[in-house]
Amino acid sequence: MADLHVVKQGTGPMVVLSHALGCDLTMWDEVAGYLQTSYTVLRYDQCGHGRSPPQAGHNYTVEAYADEAAELISQHSEGPVTFVGLVMGGMVGQQLAVRHPQWVRRLVMANAAAFFAESVRADLGARMDQVRAHGLESTADAAIRQWVSPAFLAQPEGLKKMAALRAMLQKTNSQVYVAACQSLVDADFASSNAHIACPTLVVAGTHDQNISLQSAEVLCRSISGARLHTLDTGRMSAVECPEEFAKLVHEFIQTS
């Protein structure tokens, strides 16, 4: 198993938080702080992100990250957990619930999709080309502007959080980023999601420029019984509205 950096806090039923591509577990700081009063919160840096170094033999696909998450959960929990993933973390959650259903009691996917629209795939393809040629620094500003809503950027606190997100992205290994990004471009879980049997919540940001509400609706319909909730945010819903996001997760756990 990859040598993963983890943070565990709180007591109670376990909630696992899985971050977005180019981020690390610190993007969950505020959400974890709210949830820890009722739950054991386990968050981790996916392989090649944050303080989890790249590993030989890891191919950085969604499927590999799902297998990695299953092994991590098996080490820290005696039974299934509530798995919460944002963007890439949400894609990982889809495969985790299909490949390792014994470890997923509930699934929350925020700002994720069963597959990306052609326009999004083209945008990601162009970004990968730029990263290969000029490194992550060359795409950081453009990427971050797509992550959050204009209203969030107009606030001093929003600018502070955006700077933290930018720093996370810049520290990510470029080869890992490109490989994981390619896996997201290739992903199509519309069919396999029919095998997800656990209670599922899909969260969409109404100002998400790439992962539209329509994509969230398609994701929701691909999973029997899934619920959809929108937040007035961009793609980083858990960063823009951490208290509301944590409340959504808590209410979902209590009612499912």
Image (cartoon, rainbow, N blue to C red):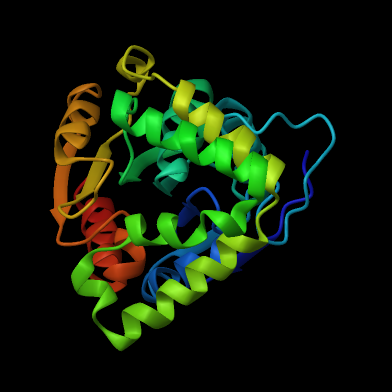
Residue 176 percent across, percent down from the top left:
68, 41
Q: Is residue 103 above or below residue 251?
A: above
Residue 31 in which image quadrant: bottom left
Q: Is residue 219 visible?
A: yes
Where does residue 239 sit, x and y in percent of width and height? 36, 67
| Quadrant in the picture for the C terminus | top left
Q: Quadrant of residue 202?
A: top left
Query: Quadrant location of the N terminus?
Result: top right
In the rendering, at what x and y percent does residue 182 appear?
Answer: 55, 29
Residue drawn at x 65%, y 40% as measured from the top left: 132
| Residue drawn at the location 31% of the way across and 87% of the way down | 156
Which residue occupies the foreground of this view, 154 or 107? 154
Residue 10 visible in the displayed image: no
Task: Find the residue positioned furthest to the bottom.
Answer: 156
Pinpoint residue 215: horizontal percent, then vertical percent.
21, 32
Q: Residue furthest top?
A: 191
Above or below, 221 relative to 40: above
* Residue found 24% across the figure and 21% down from its top: 222
Left or right: 19 with respect to 60?
left
Which residue, as the protein is rendered here, is positioned at the far right? 56
Give the residue displayed 46% in from the left and 27% down from the top.
185
Q: Dividing the picture into quarters, in which one does residue 188 lie?
A: top left
